[in-house]
Amino acid sequence: MTIRNVKNPEQIGGTSQFMIRSYRGANIIDESLMFGILGFGGSIGTLTSTTVAIDGSSSSAAGDVSKYIFSFKTDLFLPQNTYFKFNLPKATFEVSKFPSCSSFPINGNVIGGVFSCEYNSDSQSIEVRGIAQTIEAGKDVGVLVSIKNPKYSYTTGAFEIYAMKEGTTLAFTRKLDIKGVSITAGSITQIALL
């Protein structure tokens, strides 16, 4: 069902739950009192100083599990419980459903909280939750995530980083087309001369 010409709210923010009912005549035949939540926002900001890199203590070799650093500088104030979404290049990485992740210091700045990450294989994105503080505009942010490198040596496609409002799909700010990482050749093992 599509409902057209509905005016958006005057203020930025999220809505409460929608309710949907199906009628036959005057009788309700089906209803959902918690149908969904929408977020309404102004213009989406643009993150600066964005990079994705393999941590120096990890391997960049094809097929190895490495720690990836997602770093950026905020351009807007981000409220507590904002979550980050990292879109990975399509059909490139193998990621566990709940990869390990943590805050990573950038220019001495560490974001507080107990981070938890979840990988969505359909959208090929990692969502980072557990941010326990507000983040001022102009602050450096770093997140470390364990990801398995691609199977072949090459430079991956581009990444995307979003700062999102919890409970919605509303993006406060984002950066698209972040340069990919270089993957080196993996080790050759089990060599036999016949």
Image (cartoon, grey):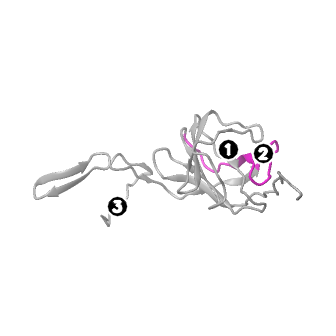
* Label disc, if present, on residue 55 of the rendered structure: 2
Q: Which of the 4 image quadrants contains residue 4?
A: bottom left
Residue 128 pos. (x, y %): 59, 43
* Viewer-proximal residue among 81 and 88: 88
Q: Which residue is mark 3?
A: 7
Other-residue count near label 1 (Cα within 10 Å), few / some / many at <14 / 14–19 / ≥20: many
In the picture provided, is 174 more to the left or to the right than 33? Answer: right
Residue occupying image coordinates x 54% and y 57%: 123
Which amino acid is tagged 1? Val
Magenta-drawn stretch contains 181: no
Which amino acid is tagged 2? Asp
Residue 158 pos. (x, y %): 68, 62
* Viewer-proximal residue among 124 and 153: 153
Residue occupying image coordinates x 70% and y 36%: 110
Q: Which residue is mark 1?
A: 145
Q: Report the residue that reaches farthest toward the right.
A: 193
Dot placed on the residue nearer the N-terminal end, 2 or 1: 2
Q: CA distance from mark 2 to mark 3?
A: 47 Å
Q: Nearer the viewer, mark 1 or mark 3?
A: 1
In the picture provided, is 144 more to the left or to the right than 133? Answer: right
* Viewer-proximal residue among 162 and 9: 162
In the picture provided, is 22 more to the left or to the right than 129? Answer: left
What segment carries the magenta color?
54-79
Dot placed on the residue nearer the N-terminal end, 2 or 3: 3
Residue 150 appears in view: yes
Residue 103 pos. (x, y %): 68, 38
